[in-house]
Image (cartoon, helix red, strand yellow):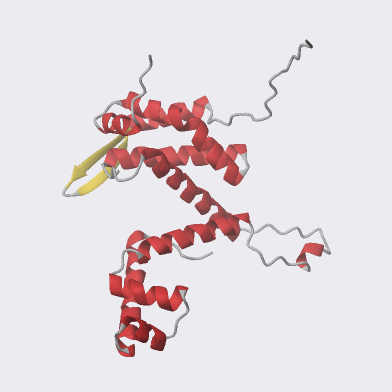
Amino acid sequence: MEKIYTKNQSNTKEVKAKPETIQFLLSYSKSLNITEADGLQFETNLN
Amino acid sequence: MVVQVEDSQLVKQYILGDEKAIEALINRHNSRLTGFIYSKVGDRELTEDIFQDTFMKVIRTLKRGAYNEEGKFLPWVMRIAHNLVIDHFRKHNRMPMYNSKESYNIFSLLGDDRLNAEKQLIKEQIDTDLLRMIKELPEDQQEVLEMRIYKDMSFKEISDNTGVSINTALGRMRYALINLRKLVEANNIVLTN
């Protein structure tokens, strides 16, 4: 029987955010601090 | 066997201060969200910007404790991204590009009445926002508004169908519009295309 060799040719390329973007978001998350005073919320970024 | 922690569990952990949880959430939904944004804007750099803005908003909302558990995490994130895409198109539309070098452009004569992809997207957003707000109105006002606007019925027909006087129907319509305006203001929604 004839052997059929097929190659998986996928034309779709997975789009993903760059590692730098992810790293930025993680740093942003770590630096963001929310404080509450008199029912008001304040955002502070501790870089 | 790898057990995958539910999104809701990761959200809880993150709110309690576990920074690893947000990393897991971002990585888990990276591809799906990037693909979603890219399918709308078709530009790699812009996709990256919107992805970043989306998660910055997610992070702020979660840290402020303003996230409600009603819906699921991913649809909520997608919705934020979707709104940011619309914001981008709205801003973009305010700054149209003109090519002054072209003395004659056939497309200025050939019109296309159909909405383009951006406007279609904005229209869908407006329709969804509007429907959501209508659902918040008291039932009697909702009924009159739907009959008048969506079914194009006259106030006489509305009166006959609901068993109230024309004046009552008119009053309900008036209050429905007043309440809708209040809801638009309260929710900071832009209803223009």
Task: Please name the residue shown 40% across and 73% down the image.
Answer: B146
Q: How many marks?
A: 0
Q: Quadrant of the N terminus of chain B?
A: top left
Q: Position of residue B38 (x, y in %)?
A: 58, 40
Q: Quadrant of residue B168?
A: bottom left
Residue B168 can be seen in this image: yes
Give x and y (percent) for residue B162. 32, 81
View extreme (front): residue: A1
Q: Whole-percent x and y of residue B142? A: 34, 71
Left or right of residue B106, residue B125 in this image: left
Q: Is residue B129 above or below residue B144?
A: above
Looking at the image, which residue is at 36% across and 86% down?
B160
Q: Which of the 4 image quadrants contains residue B193?
A: bottom right
**Residue A46 in view of the camera:** no
Task: Please state the horizontal and vertical placement of residue B34, each as a whole percent of the image.
Answer: 53, 36
Give the camera-side residue of B4 and B165.
B165
The residue positioned farthest toward the right in the image shown: B104
On the rendered structure, is B19 left or right of B193?
Answer: left
Give the vertical position of A41 relative to B107 (above or below): above
| Vertical arrangement, residue B133 with respect to residue B47, above or below | below
Name which residue lies at 44% across and 47% down.
Answer: B79
Instruction: Tell me where residue B158 sits by quadrant.
Output: bottom left
